[in-house]
Image (cartoon, grey):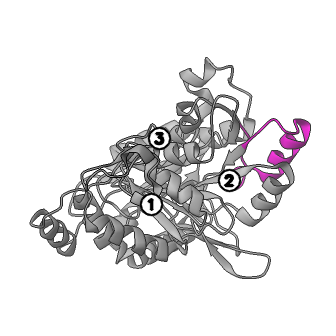
Amino acid sequence: MSSFSRIPYGRQTVTQEDIDAVVETLRSDFLTQGPKIAEFEEAFAAYVGAKYAVAVANGTAALHLAALALGVGGKSRVLTTPITFVASANCVLYCGGSVDFVDVDPESALLDLDALEIKLKKSPGLYAGVIPVDFAGLPVDLEKLRSIADRHGLWILEDACHAPGASFRSKAGTWEKCGSGKWADISIFSFHPVKHIASGEGGMITTNNRALYDKVSLLRTHGITRDTASYQNRDMAGEGAWYYEMQELGFNYRMPDILAALGLSQLRRAEEGLARRRAIARRYDSAFANSSAAPMIPTESELHAYHLYIVRVENRRAVYDRLREKGILAQVHYVPVHLQPFYRRLGFGPGDFPAAEQFYSSAISLPMFPGLSDSDVDRVIASVLESVE
């Protein structure tokens, strides 16, 4: 039996090292806009293999700024998956663009790339970009997606909120990390408490494109710069050190140094947490292999990050209720975006994306976080097997 009677589907782990890092920052001269931001950005960029990283207030802010930097506006139509959190689609609407969806692959629940190309061929020139989601921590084949995007003139905004540390194997046999910037124009991550790196709230934008990096950096802080080399008001060239310029209509999407200190501390043990997630997944895979709880097994070309561990079951509501009775707080990810009332008012509805709707009807997320003990895992396994009988 675990030390707590109920086991949630996700939970942060905060160590003494994390606490010490935050306390050190609290005692420093900077609680925001200080040196911890750049330190976290540099470390995270190195972790995913990208040239640039920009820390922001949360994952939704990251999506919004990335979409703006890519030029999303009133004439932009953008494609994404219906199996995601609503922010992946909402960010386009924030910029005045419009959203459409592509159904998911029935096995992986990732954006169906073949269906994407079929849709693009039917409407050449209609779409500006695509937002793939590394759902549950399973990486999208961005190499294949890049090829499709290039043929149809699309940019790629990778939603990698579930997938720090995940990677896929390229045609050349190399392992390509999510967020590396090699295939996507820009990528985003989240540091919500149930994510791999928990800073309370927070997000990160990564890219290899200097122009996109400069754009999101400017928009993150009200569109204001103190970079004298970029000043535009030549008539105010003689102003003193107090001077600054607002060059774009930006936002206050900054991350405080307190959260950056916590995120940086958590990043230092990211691989340890990832290894534990994968070890738990292997135990689940083995336990459910011959049961009616069907696990989602990655292929040999995918290194799953396991933000979520999802099984598909019959009578999902009954299984969900039985698990909660046993203290296993399973969750469902996600109600398809196109079925939300807001998106129904935009013209979407039941039957539009049948694979996504079928996946939703049977998917259930089991507890998955590094703090799960072996006895917790055993308890989850036993409860699931009892609940699906």
Name the element at disc 2: strand
Identify the residue at horizontal 45%, vertical 44% (top origin).
60
Name the element at disc 3: loop
Q: Which residue is mark 3?
A: 248
* Of the pair 62 and 325, the residue shown nearer to us: 62
**Which residues are drawn in magenta?**
101-128
The numbered disc on residue 367 is none
Q: Which residue is mark 2?
A: 156
Residue lying farthest to the top in this orientation: 345
* Of the pair 322 and 205, the residue shown nearer to us: 205
Marked residue nearer the N-terminal end (2 or 3): 2
Q: Quadrant of residue 233?
A: top left
x and y, in percent, of residue 156 in the image? 68, 53
Crowding near pointer 1: few (<14 within 10 Å), some, many (20+)?
A: few
x and y, in percent, of residue 35 in the image? 27, 68
Q: Which residue is mark 1?
A: 229
Q: Is-magenta flag for residue 379?
A: no
- Distance, label 2 to label 3, CA atoms, is 23 Å
Badge 1 amino acid: Ala
